[in-house]
Structure formats: C-alpha cells, structure tokens
Image: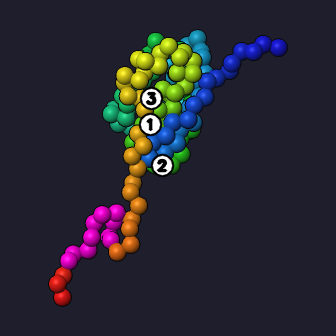
C-alpha cells in the first residue's frame, strides 16, 4: 500500500467565517470549487477574486476545494485566503516566509464587539437628556 497523500487540508478563519480548504495536487492547471460552485460564481466581484488568488500562484497545479460557513461574503473570502495559505505551508514549509510577507498567514482576529446593557450598540449611547 502506498503512503501517497491525496490532499492537504487546513482551516482558515475570519470574524465568524470558517473555511475548510483542501488542496488536491493535479497535473492540470489551477482550479477552484467553493461550496460546489466555481470561484467566479461564488465571489462575484474582482476584488474578492484577487484577494483569494493573490496567495496561490497560477503556476501551482492544485484543485482547491473549499467549504465555507458563517460570516459575510468578504469574511468568507478572507477565511478562504487564510486556509489556502496554511495548506500551502503544510505542502512546502520553505514557502512560509514568502506567504507570510503577503499577510495571508496571519489570522485577522478582529470581530464585532458585544452589545452592553444600557447602550444601543457596543458603544453608542442613547441621546442624553437633562430631564
């Protein structure tokens, strides 16, 4: 029995969005499948497509499969980018330095602040009235 690895898996996160990413080595060109759709169908704008594609170069021959949950569409794009970067580091640990320079390996931990009692939002107070 061979010990050939079928895929490399990693989890990417941003706000409440989670992306489970699998990179399958292929002999064909780079392709994406996100929640059963093509990348261009799932992320409509060019900004989000560029956000995802700038981590992985077109010379890499992988089939990228992503399962995205939670958050908004932009958070999902950033979570997918984070997951791809982590999976690429598993494949080739020497590429970690170049991927880290793009900022894709660092998890953006900022999330929405919780609402406090007596306030309208996290920090917005009701209009003050003397009487």
For residue 107, the mark is 1
x, y percent for residue 49? 39, 31
Label 2 Cα crowd, 10 Å radius (few <14 / some 14-19 / many 20+) = some
Image quadrant assignment for residue 54? top left
How packed mark 3 is, by other alpha carbons closer than 10 Å (few <14, some 14-19, many 20 or more), is many
Please give the residue where the numbered disc 3 appears in the rendered image: 105
Q: CA distance from mark 1 to mark 3?
A: 6 Å
Q: Nearer the viewer, mark 3 or mark 2?
A: 3
Identified at 39% across, 54% down, the residue is 112
Farthest residue to the right: give it: 1
Instruction: Tell me if residue 73 can be seen.
Output: no
Q: Which residue is mark 2?
A: 16
| Residue 28 visible within the image | yes
- Tell me what residue is drawn at x 38 percent, y 28 percent: 103
Residue 129 in percent (x, y) is at: 18, 82
**x%, y% of residue 58?**
44, 16
Q: Between residues 131 and 82, which one lies in front from this camera angle?
A: 131
Number of numbered labels in the structure image: 3
Q: Main secondary structure of the magenta part?
A: loop
Q: Secondary structure at mark 1?
A: loop
Assign the C terminus to one quadrant of the image.
bottom left
Dot 1 or dot 2, earlier in sequence: 2
> Quadrant of the image for the N terminus?
top right
Magenta segment? 119-128
Name the residue located 38 percent from the left edge and 68 percent from the top edge.
116
Q: Tell me: residue 72, above or below residue 46.
A: below
Q: Mark 1 to mark 2: distance in Å?
A: 12 Å
Residue furthest to the bottom in view is: 131
Q: Which element carries disc 3, helix, strand or loop? A: loop
Position of residue 67 measured from the top left corner of the image (x, y, whole percent)? 57, 38
């Amino acid at each position: 029995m061979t010990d050939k690895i079928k895929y490399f898996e990693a989890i990417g996160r941003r706000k409440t969005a989670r992306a489970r990413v699998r990179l399958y080595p292929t002999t064909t060109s780079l392709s994406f499948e996100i929640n059963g759709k093509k990348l261009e169908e799932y992320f409509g704008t060019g900004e989000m497509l560029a956000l995802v594609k700038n981590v992985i170069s077109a010379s890499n021959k992988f089939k990228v499969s992503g399962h995205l949950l939670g958050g908004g569409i932009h958070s999902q794009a950033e979570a997918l980018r984070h997951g791809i970067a982590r999976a690429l580091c598993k494949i080739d640990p020497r590429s970690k330095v170049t991927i880290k320079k793009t900022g894709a390996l660092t998890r953006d931990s900022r999330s929405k602040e919780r609402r406090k009692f007596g306030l309208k939002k996290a920090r917005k107070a009701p209009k003050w009235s003397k009487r």
